[in-house]
Amino acid sequence: MTETIAFQGLIGLSLAMYLWLISAGLTIIFGVLRILNFAHGSLFMVGAYLAYTFYGQMGLPFGVAILLSLLGTGLLGFVMERGFLSRIYKVDEAYQLLLTFGFILILDDAVKIIWGGVFKIPPIPAFLEGAWPMFGKSFPVYNVFVIAVGLAVAVVLWAVFEKTWWGRIVRATASDREMANAIGVNVPRVFSGVFVLGAMLAALGGAIGIPVRVVAPGIGTAMIIQAFIITVIGGLGNLKGAFLSSLIVGVLSAYGTLFFPVFELFFIFAIMAVVLLVRPQGLFAR
Amino acid sequence: MSKNFTALGSIVVFTVFLFPGGPAQAQAQCKLGVPSIKVGVQGVASGPLADYGRQIEMGATLATEEINAAGGVLGCRVEMRFMDDENRAATGVKNTRLLVTDWGANFTVGTDSSGVAMALGPVLAELKRIQFFTHAATQRLTEELVAAKGIKEIVRVSAPIYQDAIVAALLFKDRKDIKRWATIGADYEYGYVAWNLFKETLRKYRPDVEFVGEAWAPFLTLDFSPHIAAVMAQKPDAIFATPWGGEAVQLLRQALIQGVFDNVQVWWQAMGGSVDVLEGIAAEVAKDRFKGKLWATARYIHNWPDTPENKAFVERFRKRWARFPNYSAETTYSAFFIMKAAVEKAQSLDTVRVLGALKGMQIRNPAGVRVFRSEDQQFIYNVPAGRPVIDPKYPIPVLGDLKVFEAKDYYRNPPFTPVAITK
């Protein structure tokens, strides 16, 4: 039984890393731009489709395909932010919701036109095949890879925001954009940079899963709801909160599947409801 | 005689030269006195299951083209209009009302989701229009809405959930080495009923079998790893899995990398015989990664039956669309020909008269002979179960090692006893 519990925890950890990658971008964008980007799931989907094209169709190495997908989705993010979102920062928030919701519809249809309605699933790269024996069972190398990528991103993001000049500027802009502007920070450029970073994180979440999760129109919608729940639990705009609440949600839902299979669906929503009642600002908000 | 012949000839010449292939030609000859027979078609055309609706649309389009090329129905041209129901009951209902009331559909065809189908039932009764259902599988559609509540506007052409569940029980009842079954189920009515029907049927033959674990995955699940790990912790001998479409493919791939096929004797992937699933697992089948333990069925498979009708249909379908027909394409295609046969017999588009004409109908379709059962208005036909294999005749895997059960042995019979629709 101990082995089963430990193994399920590891599975939950890999689930948590996917959740972390998508909610990290969402929460960073909200923290700095104050925009709740409904289309964040669509960026996840576009990242997955681009990685599929580079890896599954053009036959490029998996790592290269992921990098190209990040660049492509980053570019799309740049166009979205500069061309559209930047024009509505000053108006009512409802317009932001409408605009980003519009992007969901446009991108969902666009991928259907470009890639068709049939789901795609490329082969698993040879170096990620197989499993490691853990707790008397086989833990897939693929899940190890996902955990490693998730943790690496957490470390890199922490280093960027805490240790670099750019990170300090971003944090300054997030806490007071007018003051940042007054001391000479190019706020629009910071906004673009942050949005592109967020888009790339979403794309990474989409791209790393393509050989084990299908790429299909609509997968973005599946992810965005979970990402929202995680950012709400962790505190909107709080990166550390997003990481910790991804862990909580990922691991708890894996245990939910093991111990309470009948109520599994209800778990994640129950956690959110309790957090909203007890600490509406999020578990890890300061 | 010769006078008539000349007259007929001049009409033909007149219409061919002045209205080449145009609607006026059909109109002039239509014995039902309508400009055209309108058939409204619906399916899921957006989201991850969009290909099922697309297959419905392709089947409907091909049937419409072929019927019209052969002179229509009683000389009347068939007109088809496809709409996306978005896998939502509200959209499906709205579409049906629009198709019937505004567009003037004489019949409706299609519907992938059981939830949408159940919502359409009462609306069809109110609108007094027949829908030929071609994918939705819940037994409640025919057992509850038709047989118990008497909604005669529902006719189902496709195989219901008996195919997914009862066939599996018959297939594995003699496997004495399998004593422990677990499910990774679709977390909605379809998944619950399939598992309940399977358990109920298997228990009759094998009181010694235990049902040791269950994990439920909602629609749009991307990661099945926790579900797989949870049921494998119960050490089952066999898995009964109901996620379908792309979800079936990622479930199987995630099961492979957790080494499940080293530890179970059988994995039943109910609708794994669907063309999109077979395409998705092609590489794994070619490498025999499932070790012959994966079994599946569908509501039609393009490589069975081995009849000239079926072969010709598959060939025409591939020529038209460069794809293999999935089950929702065949059932929809056949629904059009069932509609044609019924209208020709009834000599009318009237709902009651067409329903009367369906009584006792036996019709040869690509899927084989379909027999109409009046009590629940369900067409009955066999679809085999088998293992995905590579066959050099086809570019994608097909179901092979086929086991055929007589449909009358696995379709439930009236009077129906209710099946639990809960987990």
Image (cartoon, grey):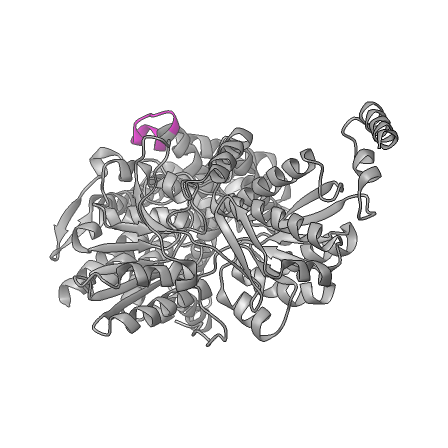
Is B361 situated left or right of B277 in this image? Answer: right
| Magenta stretch: includes residue A60 | yes
Position of B384 compared to B380: left or right?
left
In the image, residue B157 lies at what x, y percent? 55, 55
Q: Residue furthest top?
A: B17
Residue A213 percent across, percent down from the top left: 36, 45
Q: Is residue B414 above or below residue A239?
A: below
Kindly identify the residue that appears in the image at 67 percent across and 61 percent down.
B355
Quadrant of the image for the C terminus of chain B?
bottom left
Of residues A58 and A163, the one drawn nearer to the viewer in this rendering: A58
Does residue B7 appear left or right of residue B408 in this picture? right
**Whether residue A106 can be seen here:** no
The quarter of the displayed image where residue A123 is located: top left
Residue B209: within the magenta?
no
Q: What is the number of callouts on the image?
A: 0
Q: Position of residue A77 (x, y in %)?
A: 50, 36
Which range of residues does the magenta coloring cover? A57-67
* Position of A141 relative to B362 (above/below): above
Left or right of A98, for residue B289: left
Res B111 visible: yes
Q: Residue at x 28, y 51 (%)?
A: A14
**Residue B402: x and y, percent?**
32, 47
Q: Is residue B45 above or below residue B128?
A: above
Q: Quadrant of the N terminus of chain B?
A: top right
